[in-house]
């Protein structure tokens, strides 16, 4: 029944972590070091999931628990603590200037906000 600060200098991307009682956020610890962290809503503890992509604060979770991010021009999935590139098969448009990501509740669609060419 009172406010509790769990972290300051966080990014705009707050998400419930699938199949967990936890939320994720990007903690901007310094100008050079941004980390994706987990806040466990049962234990009230904060832990590090992985380093964020350099200078990137937008992430999205698939319903199966895969964490996605971008370096601005390519999509990546987190495997362990390593970001692995994802191949996107689309003739519609080349990815460029990615700024936001969202995954549909059923995991079948990915929305990507990006700059126009």
Image (tube, helix red, strand yellow):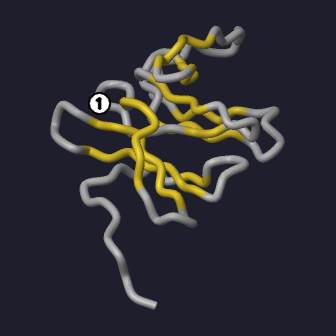
Q: In this view, does 99 lie above or below 116?
A: below
Q: Nearer the viewer, residue 116 or 52?
A: 52
| Left or right: residue 32 compared with residue 86 | left
Q: Is residue 12 above or below residue 104?
A: below
Element class at badge 1: loop
- State the count of labels: 1
Q: Which residue position holds label 1? A: 55
Q: In which quarter of the image is residue 85?
A: top right
Q: Which of 2 and 47 is in front in this view?
A: 47
Residue at 83 percent of width and 42 percent of height: 106
Outermost residue on the bottom side: it is: 1
Q: Is residue 114 above or below residue 36?
A: above
Q: Nearer the viewer, residue 58 or 28?
A: 28
Residue at 72 percent of width and 49 percent of height: 19
| Left or right: residue 24 compared with residue 54 | right
Residue at 26 percent of width and 60 percent of height: 8
Q: Residue 84: horizontal and vertical position, in percent?
A: 53, 13
Residue at 54 percent of width and 19 percent of height: 76
Q: Quadrant of residue 35?
A: top left
Q: Which of 43 and 101 is in front in this view?
A: 43
Q: Residue 36: horizontal and vertical position, in percent?
A: 41, 40
């Amino acid at each position: 029944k009172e406010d509790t600060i769990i972290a300051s200098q966080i990014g705009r991307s707050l998400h419930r972590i699938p199949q967990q009682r936890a939320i994720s956020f990007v903690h901007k610890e310094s100008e050079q070091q941004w980390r994706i962290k987990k806040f466990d809503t049962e234990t009230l503890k904060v832990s590090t999931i992985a380093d964020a992509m350099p200078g990137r604060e937008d992430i999205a979770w698939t319903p199966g628990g895969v964490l996605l991010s971008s370096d601005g021009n390519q999509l990546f999935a987190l495997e362990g603590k390593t970001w692995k590139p994802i191949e996107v098969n689309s003739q519609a448009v080349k990815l460029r200037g990615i700024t936001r990501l969202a995954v549909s509740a059923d995991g079948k669609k990915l929305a990507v906000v990006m700059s126009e060419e």
